[in-house]
Amino acid sequence: MKVLISGGGTGGHVFPAIAIADAIKKAMPGADFLFVGAMGKLEMEKVPKAGYSIEGLWISGFQRKLTVRNLLVPFKLAASLIKARRLVRRFTPDVAVGVGGYASGPTLEMACRMGVPALIQEQNSYAGVTNRLLGSKVSKVCVAFEGMERYFPAEKIVFTGNPVRDAIRSSHASREEGIAHFQLDAGKRTILVFGGSLGARSMNEAMALQTELLAKTPDVQVIWQSGSLYIDRFRDCDTAKLTNVKIMPFIDRMDLAYAAADAIVGRAGAITISELCLVGKPVVLIPSPNVAEDHQTKNAMALVEKNAAVLVKDGEAGESIIRKPLEILKDRNWAESLGKNILLLARPNAAEDIAKQVIILANLKV
């Protein structure tokens, strides 16, 4: 079986794509894979590291602000369609999978035109432009949120959830292991604050304002992931110097950070939310305002409406980034309810469920 997988641009697209490939390979050990990504993007580094071949397209999207680079977009699209057609013809896939991102559009478009059964996976509660355009052409659409009939034909939708990294899904780490790993005090409640691997500027600026509050709350400790872009700016701020605050640029063992935490504060990216559902802890979501169509707020609201998370607006982070999780931890019933409700939304077998749909489509190829 030959599987063509396309998309990327961010970790939220790349890592699910790899997880889907891994699940297919586990079910079909003889499967052959070809990834197609955008040149210069994250997938061109991460996919080969995961052991898969990848080809790059010269493709990018329109910039929101007026820029000369927008003039190149039509030429990039034409070149990418031509190369995508050549790749499909050469690889002769039995099935094509799109995970969103710039490269997914031309690749899935040409695969569909050439009669290859295709599936797309939409991670967010607000469907991206590429996936919306492809929705009418593909055979199946795997989604992670309810109500996606707004964007895709209902008969094509399969509710699978989002694949998450195996280190989180299969983790059996205890709170004690997490506390020991980060050299924390087992007698204190722990708040984990993170804004992604690169960091979130507004969340870091909000944390820098928490010196007085955290100094007055010595029975609480904070793991603060600033992100690699911001560590030099914030490592010497007054909040970071507090004895009950541990700042770090990046957390390699997120499974242990989740295990150590009594409450978690983070962005509302689709994959982050999928991980947090598996963790089952009280969560405060601060959606990034710097994303297309404000989709992180829509992701967060899907949980808030089920009493499975608390939302704090980005502009209110300075006031609430620590105050809100403290309020939750002081109310045991509220904390337990949030943890129980978010756990009900977990989809631990998402990668396997998507892989099953891919295999079914591959077997339909004439």
Image: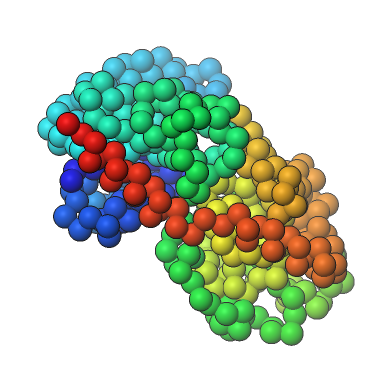
* Residue 26, above or below 177: above
Please give left or right for residue 177 compared with residue 342 in the image.
Answer: left
Q: Position of residue 304 (x, y in %)?
A: 73, 47
Quarter holding residue 213: bottom right
Please give left or right for residue 348 compared with residue 343 in the image.
Answer: left
Q: Position of residue 187 (x, y in %)?
A: 74, 85
* Residue 254, above or below 218: above
Can residue 164 be seen from the camera position used here? Answer: yes
Q: Position of residue 239 (x, y in %)?
A: 74, 65
Q: Which residue does the image show at 53% across and 17% down from the upper left?
A: 66
Please give left or right for residue 151 compared with residue 361 in the image.
Answer: right
* Residue 42, above or below 197: above
Please give left or right for residue 40 compared with residue 214 in the image.
Answer: left
Q: How many marks?
A: 0
* Residue 332, above or below 175: above
Q: Which residue does the image show at 73% across and 45% down from the upper left?
A: 305
Q: Position of residue 221 (x, y in %)?
A: 73, 73
Q: Which residue does the image show at 63% across and 50% down from the upper left?
A: 267
